[in-house]
Amino acid sequence: MTSGEPTFSIVVSTTDRALPLRTLLRSLEHQTYSQFEVLVVVGPTHDGTLDVLAEYASRVRVLRCPTANLSRSRNIGVRDARGEIVAFIDDDAVPSNRWLEQLARLFANPRLDATGGVVYAVHPNDSRVQHRLGAMSSLAEQQDVCESWLDNLAPHAEGLHRERHRFSAVEGRQWLTRMMGTNMAYRRAALLSVGGFDEFYEWVFDESDLAFRQSDAGQIVHPVRECAVYHVPASSRNRVVFTQRGNWWIQTKAGVYFTIRHGRRAGDALSAIALRCLHLVHGHWLYYDQLQRTKKIPRVRAWRACWQELRAGTSGALHAFGAASTLASVSTSESSQPMVPFQNEQSAQQPSVDPVSGYRPAISLPDSPLRICLLSSAYPPMHYDGVGRSTNVLARGLFECGHSVNVVTRGDTEQVAFYDGAYVHQLPTRLDRYAAYHRYTNVHYALNHSHAAYDMIRRLILNDGIQIVDSPIWQVDGLVTAVSQVAPVVVRIVTAVRQISALQNERHDDARLMGEMESALIQRAAHLIHNTRATMHATEQVYAVQPETGRFSIVPYGIVPAPDDAVRPFDLSRQDDALTVLFVGRLEKRKGILDLFEAIPRVLRQLPTVQFVIAGADNSQHDGFQARHGSNYATYFTRRNSALAAHVQFLGAVSEENLQALYQACDLFVAPSLYESFGLIYLEAMNYAKPVIGCNAGGIPEVVEHGVTGLLVEPEAPDHLAEALVSLLQSRKRLREMGLAGRQRLLDKFTHIQMARGFERAYRAVVSAQAQLRTGERHEAFAHGG
Amino acid sequence: MKRLLTADDVLSDIEFEIMQGALARDDIGESIVAVRQFQQRLRADTFESRKQPDWRAMLSRQFQLNEMLITLLQELAAQQRATQFQSTRTAARPLTSAIVADTHSNGNHALPPSLPFDDPVDKPARETIEARVQTDALTQEMDARPNSLPLVGALLTRLRLALHSLTLFYVNRLAVKQTSNNRALADAVLQLSDVVQQQQDELASLRAQLDARGSQRS
């Protein structure tokens, strides 16, 4: 280890959480700061914790704690730590990649004694900002999430104290910033000088108590907004996660003890302290009563819990008034033994890990995994659209290839959740910038989201060391980032707004300006990725972009192959004539829905038993159809073909699960789009071995092989479309053969792994070019300076 | 005639917004915004409300404001010391390792967060601060509307004047105390600014030395 930079000891206290512990240890391989050791303090354990630790025998120091007491366990870790800084993280959390690097940067300030960062709960069932710039009062009132560290100076009082303590500065009640136990770091010497953790606190309030004692000792405790840790709350002996079950009286005991000790010390009125203690006990009583009333726990258990609360409160009070100190007598001597570094030569090449399941792809990487940020305004499971789905598939593929993936998308609240191989950061829509564009609805919306995405990317660069940003051209998500040049932006080219405007005869200013913004994004992109040759040619024509060598790639999209047992090729032994034709897509002119409407009667004249299923949201209001015809698409069809209504089913927007079931159940898939840059829908049908019919336009011929995996017709030719439908529906053998050929073509060319490999090549080229550029600029600056 | 907005407008607005954002980029920037908002609320509550001010509430809010400013100053001082420490450490690091470390850093985040403003308090800003902390800056003057009601109007006006002069007596007494507080805070800010200036000079000279050493080696 080199001298000059601070050394860290990461202390992890664990009891019977072998799997989350393994996930944490795997994630520590990716820390960008290498000067740290790991100490795991194991409490009474009965699961495979020690087996997991045996895998890291030469890299992790294992200590034992005889009781399940968090403070005691932490003190054991601190005592044996050899680093200058002791960082604590829970066994059910994983740190951001630059966690230690950011902490080291903060501890470069010699006055700082303790710090900690934001904690995001990232389980898909429980995703939220769990802790940020938290504050705690001397009466154990918590405010876990603050916007700024000045919030804690005048927090809104809660519960019983709302009126009495409206003005905390006058009343003397003390509020202090505090960290959350799963993300905090201390100078070891400072921590030891105040006696370490108070071992009366078995669980919770330990870190707040320490913050108060450090403050009394004149030490500086300064939590920050960044240095993120991702938390996946796991069950423990004190609580069962995602249920109401838990030994909540342990919190009451600690809370009462904390209130009396610190309330008295801060000079709070005795009546206020007593009221707060009663509130702590009574609050839990009300909680148990509610659980019992809603039949979540039996009456006997509720009564027992209430009795435990009373006992715990009394115990906390008696200990608080007792003079005996429960502070540990920890040695302040520095260890002379060298640290055992956690990371080794293989650490840099380890694939990324799923913090929720602990899964890590079983591959070995020749290089370090890339740290990638994908942008997509819409993203499953909140919103499904073509771009969102392809981004989701790309994220899954990149994760399977070992890379670390973050996705930035829109959402209702600020939160981060990990699913499908990526940390998905949701940004609530706030239209608080770019007021000059409020008349251009799409532009205004797109610019505000693009700016919010840029803010998030800056935080991701800080916390996770993002190397590359990938933005679809759709909605220009990456425009502000590209202008700012904080990170290289790779642009995925899909159907351009200008193309859509031309196809749908839209001539309004909003679309014009969006088109210009797309052009600006293309010009500022570090690299362009087209999904087909057709897209590349279209970009040349629409935006007058000449393909420069090395600045563009063609990477076909892919999807995650369905398991073999889910595939349903046409069954030749079927006797019935009720064949089903499926259409999937927004109901609008560009998707060829009007051509299908023309073709359906012609097909039914020849094959009267065929059923058509049309799935997709109606877009008639936005594409001007309703204004011209006075009805939406479904009504328009039914009015003109009332006799055929029984053969055509309009489902509207369907859920992802239903959509997959529809693909699985159909016999033939049709989507006569006038233009598709790629056409993911065809792949989705081919995934279940279904033959497809599309148009000879855009990138569709590069996906559908005419005569082999389906048929292609000219766009806006309903006669040909009807002929193609009839010809396939009349030949069951072709339905089966083409379906199977489509599935094979997908497995050969269009899987998510193949897609991710193509993107990875482009990303690596950009990252390497950027590194060379930086080196060149540095040398140039150096030469000028000389 | 109304001009159509173009991509050039969008791009220049993006750059403006990025620059604006940079001012509130770190905790200090955000906190300055918070203090400002708090002060605006306080001012509105105190002077724009028709209700008689609650002295206890006003005092309490003023204390909160002072607390905020003191915390801000503490943080400024801490960050400034961190910058000083970092610059000393960077200067002490061997040249080659500095270059290697910088080459490997991905996001240009090797230095601690910058202060919300690049330059120390400049001359016009200094004059503004000085002007704002003059003794009479917060002093309020009588502003009571005469009542035009027949018969009782004159009486009501005299009553209103009496009440206003009583209010003003307390407000101005508070203003004098607040001004002395502000004076102390402003002095601290200006002193800090001088220290920052001094250190920027020192940093520049250290950089010059570093460059000189680099050129000697090459």
Image (tube, coloured by chain):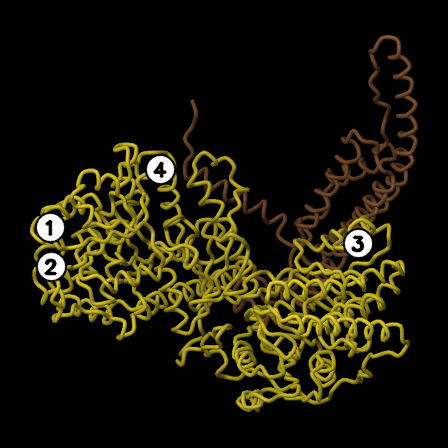
Chain colours: A yellow, B brown
Dot 1 or dot 3, earlier in sequence: 3
| Front one among A126 and A327 | A126
Measure how far apart labels 2 and 4 are at the Cα level: 43 Å
The chain carrying label 3 is A
**Both on one chain, marks 1 and 3?**
yes
Crowding at dot 2, Cα within 10 Å, few <14 / some 14-19 / many 20+, comes out as: many
Residue A324 x, y percent position in the rendering: 89, 79
Name the residue type under label 1: Val
The chain carrying label 4 is A
Mark 3, secondary structure of its residue? helix
Measure how far apart labels 1 and 3 are at the Cα level: 75 Å
- Residue A512's mark? 4
Measure how far apart labels 4 and 1 are at the Cα level: 40 Å
Which residue is denoted by mark 1 in the rendering? A603
**Front position among marks 3 and 4:** 3
Dot 3 or dot 4, earlier in sequence: 3
The chain carrying label 1 is A
Mark 2, secondary structure of its residue? helix
Q: Are marks 1 and 2 in contact (CB under 8 Å)?
A: yes
Dividing the picture into quadrants, the one containing residue B27 is: bottom right
In the picture, which quadrant includes the C terminus of chain A?
Answer: bottom right
Q: Please indicate, yes or no, whether residue A282 appears anywhere in the rendered image.
A: yes
